[in-house]
Image (cartoon, rainbow, N blue to C red):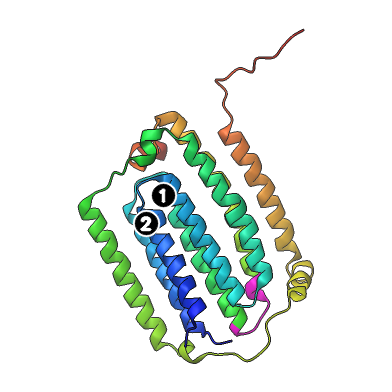
């Protein structure tokens, strides 16, 4: 049986996910997205993995959500509040979502994972560090290269060439 | 540990459905990025939940990798949106048609 903390967290997470997509203003939407990401961090705490929860808080709530917020503020004011959508497309989308949820949910409910519980202790975070440095070390190096490449790519893409820097010559 | 695996998996399915709805309905590029974020978080929740109940350390390790890659993806995606906004003065993806070449 689910406990009260779990229910509260799932209401917060799913409700703010819907709010992030449906609120009229993009700024409030990105704040609601922060709620979703924080709710997921709470789920990680419930799953006895505090290291991943803190990583989630630092990376998602701390940097990605703030990055999105600043990008939203760079956009023109009337575009933030403009909401263009097709009524028919919206109904088709809601139908797609419901069909998907019901189908996947019923498949999962019929499968064997309904009865899985565990009494074993949680994984120690020292094991994660050992994993990173032993079995997964090529992936770790590759991830570092990908991060560097993506930061360089983002900087190159966002650079403006039409603006001249005014440098003082004296 | 009172919670069962099925609860977390069902929350993850709900988040995945909401993300698919957002990707298929919204035309605002930043909102589509929100939907992608929600889907990635559903996947991370699944990874950590299965890793807890097996129990195996691979779930948390892969979730950490996934979070880092998602950070890179959001950076590149936002800068692409900024470039397209500078070209078209709009963030509606229906206006980005000439990007397809």
Let me know if residue B76 appears in the view: yes
Quarter the C terminus of chain A occupies: top right
The chain letter for the residue carrying disc 2 is B
For label 1, the residue is B31
> Does the magenta run of residues contain B57?
yes
Checking the image for residue B22, the label placed there is 2
- Check the image and report above or below for A155 versus A38: above
Let me know if residue B23 appears in the view: no
- Check the image and report above or below for A17 versus B84: below
Q: Position of residue B24 (x, y in %)?
A: 34, 56
Q: Position of residue B79 (x, y in %)?
A: 54, 40
For residue A93, side relative to residue B9 (left or right): left
Determine contact: label 1, label 2, CB under 8 Å: yes
Q: Position of residue A68 (x, y in %)?
A: 52, 46
Checking the image for residue B50, the label placed there is none
> Does the magenta run of residues contain B44?
no
- The part of the image, by quadrant, that contains residue A121 is bottom right
Q: CA distance from mark 1 to mark 2?
A: 7 Å
SS label for mark 2: helix
Q: Which residues are magenta?
A: B53-60
- The part of the image, by quadrant, that contains residue A123 is bottom right
- Viewer-closest of A142 and A89: A89
Q: Residue at position x 39%, y 88% from top?
A: A110
The chain letter for the residue carrying disc 1 is B
At label 1, counting other C-alpha atoms closer than 10 Å, the crowd grade (few under 14, some 14-19, many 20 or more) is many
Query: Could you confirm whether marks 1 and 2 are on the same chain?
Result: yes
Q: Residue at position x 44%, y 29% from top?
A: B87
Hey, which residue is sitting farthest left in the picture? A88
């Amino acid at each position: 049986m689910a406990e009260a903390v779990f229910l509260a967290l799932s209401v917060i997470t799913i409700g703010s996910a819907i709010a992030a997509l449906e609120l009229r203003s993009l700024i409030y939407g990105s704040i609601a997205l922060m709620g979703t990401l924080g709710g997921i961090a709470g789920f990680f705490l419930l799953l006895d993995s505090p290291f991943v929860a803190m990583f989630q808080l630092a990376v998602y709530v701390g940097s990605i959500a703030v990055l999105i917020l600043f990008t939203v503020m760079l956009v023109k004011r009337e575009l933030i509040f403009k909401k263009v959508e097709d009524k028919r497309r919206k109904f088709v989308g809601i139908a797609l979502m419901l069909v998907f949820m019901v189908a996947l949910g019923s498949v999962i409910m019929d499968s064997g994972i309904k009865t899985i519980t565990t009494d074993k202790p949680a994984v120690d975070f020292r094991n994660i560090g050992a994993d990173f440095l032993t079995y997964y070390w090529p992936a770790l190096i590759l991830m570092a290269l990908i991060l560097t490449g993506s930061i360089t790519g983002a900087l190159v893409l966002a650079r403006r060439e039409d603006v001249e820097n005014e440098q003082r010559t004296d | 540990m009172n919670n069962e695996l099925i609860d977390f998996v069902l929350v993850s399915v709900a988040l995945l459905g909401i993300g698919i709805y957002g990707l298929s309905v919204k035309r605002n590029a930043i909102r589509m990025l929100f939907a992608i974020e929600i889907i990635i978080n559903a996947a991370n929740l699944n990874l950590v939940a299965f890793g807890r109940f097996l129990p195996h350390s691979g779930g948390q390790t892969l979730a950490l990798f996934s979070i880092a890659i998602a950070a890179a993806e959001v950076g590149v995606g936002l800068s692409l949106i900024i470039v397209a906004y500078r070209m078209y003065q709009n963030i509606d993806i229906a206006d980005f048609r000439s990007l397809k070449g």
